[in-house]
Image (cartoon, coloured by chain):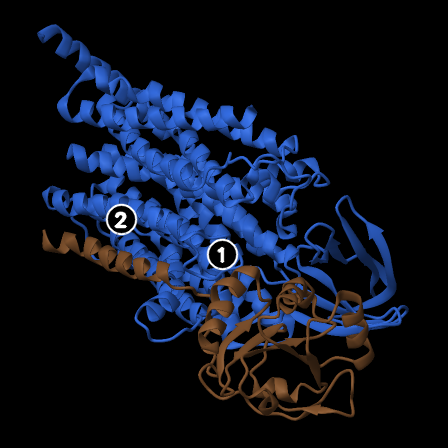
Amino acid sequence: MKRFLLPLAVFILLVGFLAVGLKLNPREVPSPLVGRAAPSFDLPLLHQPDKRFAPADMRGKVWLLNVWASWCVSCRDEHPILMALAKRGVMPILGLNYKDKGDEATAWLKQFGNPYELSVVDADGRIGIDYGVYGVPETYLIDPEGVIRYKQIGPVTAAILEQKILPLALVLKE
Amino acid sequence: MIPEIGQFSLIVALALALAQAALSLTGAARGIPGFVAVARPAAQGQFVFVAIAFACLAWSFYSNDFSVLNVASNSNSSLPAAYRIAATWGSHEGSLLLWVLMLSLWMLAVSVFSRSLPDEMVARILGVMGLIAVGFLCFMLFTSNPFERLLPAAADGRDLNPLLQDPGMVFHPPMLYMGYVGFSVAFAFAIAALLDGKLDATWARWSRPWTTAAWVFLTVGIALGSFWAYYELGWGGWWFWDPVENASFMPWLIGTALIHSLAVTEKRGAFKNWTVLLAIIAFSLSLLGTFLVRSGVLTSVHAFATDPKRGIFILCFLAVVIGGSLALYAWRANRVEPGGRFELLSRESMLLANSVLLLVACGAVMLGTLYPLFLDALGLGKISVGPPYFESVFMPLMAPAILLAGIGPLVAWRKGDSAQLMRRLRWVWIAALVGALFVPLAFGRWAALTSAGLLLAFWILAGTLTSLIVRIKSGTKITSAFLGMLLAHAGVGVFVIGITLVKSYETERDLRMAPGESAELGGYSFRFEGVREVRGPNYAAARAAIAVQRDGAQVARLEPEKRIYLVQQNPMTEAAINAGISRDIYVSLGESVGEGAWTVRIHIKPFIRWIWFGCLMMAFGGLLAASDRRYRATRRREATSAADATVVRGSTA
């Protein structure tokens, strides 16, 4: 009798794992950067190349850093959501223009609208390496102390914005 | 109106399934002939209503009824008609309806082709299948209604995922599901036998053609899926060890083990418990596959929109059906009498070893598939398991299985003769060694793994041929079951040759080509003639023309495309392939890099067609075996003796 119970026992164990697995999201890859200070940089602005920006300038504010490029197809999907968010004025959105050409990037923003307070230029992608960028677009939520609180790989969807980013931003603002 | 008829039919089908399960199982347990008699008509009625529901959904797709949510989300008015119909099973809800349609089709088949079986047995079998139908119909009606309305109706649909707009979509899912769901018949036979307490050779003989038929469909379905991925995904791979592929491959492995184990149970009355367990596992893995695909617990290219409620429903269903049948197994299996004895060197022990190897291989695939989930559930981090794991674990397990498959048919039942076996294997050894050493020389490059793969392939081919010769010499009648077995084994050999040669000798180049430029690969020259814009029914494409020449003579003119599907704005690569027995030339178009130049990827894949041809041989072998007259002949004999028994019972009563 006992050895015939073995398949059942194995199966019960499997069901236990599957039940726990249902609550997990396999697409969420935790970034080692979450909970750490946002890597600093000092880059020229896209529209005013003679001016420069560093993340330290945003101290005391909750803000989003969005990695984008004019060659990136998914950025176009994400764009209307960023535009709407910018219009609501919940928090500043800053762009990191990644491995792009200046004139193409400005033309792209002219065509689709500019949700960014400003965009910095990371033409050779060096800052992207510091931030662990491996798919454009990526978005980082950064708190008043300059710590990354959330990282989104791939486009921000309306659901992610409403359920993850905005609630977290509200908590951080308090 | 039409979608409501479909919805109503599903509800009627659910009522019939409930009646079928409750009445026939009670009837068989208590011996109530009136209840037992419900099984067949209920199953047939259920098929009619599920078919009506399916036809209604297909009609909604065909007629562009965008007031049905499912249609609005998965179709579009500019989608060609064939794909609109195939879109019926392109969504989560629709594919469930296809699942249930296949289940009811198998039930219909059992109810029609089971005249020779005792009525109570049929009632138990259909009762168990009815229970499964209840689960799936409830799942559909309560969590995934395919007929949900969208009011106000959408002006147009969001279109079918462009990846699915392919002839493969028309054939691959129905075939695969036919196989998946077909194991429910073997499962129902096993549960019926456990309930009845009669696990014997007759039971095995009845199950065999059904199991083999399901396996044939699954083989064809998987092969079609692999072929589709090869030409559609644009980078020339044919198997990715993706969780959803594994979900279909695991039941296939166990189904293969089951077919062989059933042979022993029928011929020698041995391994009864083992065979029953395999039958339960095969179908359990089909259900598990459905769970993995539908619940979104794993990431996969096949991922559908997921909903936790659905996952919980299937998991509960899984727990009840599989848990219940394994509990029944634990309760009843120890009462089964042991079968005929056999020696270490005998066909029985070889078949047993083979089915254990297949089971372990399936376990290895399952471990790799679920490992990310296990680790994540234990909070040990997120990882993904890729092809290197599967290849390094799976191959060494399959190698001895293939060696055994080459010898198995040469060894006698019960007690083999080792001297005779050695004599018979003499030519097999020579053929395998010669093939393994000399074929790589023809390609000009030798590697240990290449030789090992070819050794296995020639071993099983030569072993199979020897079996045929031995059988002809012995003068025993050659049945279609025997021929089917040989053909399927030879198919494995052809399949292994294909894999080995592709893995060892495929070549590829990534190029930047401007109009007029040429490149060389594997003795062929490729001249890029430029790209022009073309319009399809629902896409715009850039179509390149590449002239392929060998020794100055034109071999082919290939036209790979880069398509943008207009509704979803998704880019898709359509590779162009020049197929051949000894090689495929495979060209796919990358991105435009300015001034008329494009990135182009060229592959030469030697003997890749042999992979799918081998699968077709296996499937055709299975078809031959399942259609063996023996099953029908014994049935008729069985039927007369059953009829006699009724007469006797009638006269004494």
Chain for colour blue? B
Q: Is residue B452 left or right of residue B189?
A: right
Q: Nearer the viewer, residue B538 or B167?
A: B538
The residue tagged with tag 2: helix, strand or loop? helix
Chain A palette colour: brown
Mark 1 crowd level (few <14, some 14–19, many ≥20, 10 Å Cα): many
Q: How many marks?
A: 2
Relative to B442, is B339 on the left or the right?
A: left
Quadrant location of the N terminus of chain B in the rendered image: top right
Instruction: Tell me where residue A6 appears, x and y as whole percent.
Output: 18, 56
Q: Which mark is residue B319?
A: 2
- For disc 2, the neighbor class at 10 Å (few under 14, some 14 to 19, many from 20) is some
**Amino acid of disc 2:** Ala
Q: Quadrant of residue B607?
A: bottom right
Give the left or right position of residue B594, taking residue B166 as reference: right
Q: Is residue B614 above or below residue B625?
A: below
The quarter holding residue B2 reads: top right
Looking at the rendered structure, the secondary structure element under dot 1 is helix
Answer whether residue A46 is visible to the viewer in this image. Answer: yes
> Residue B493 shows which numbered tag?
1
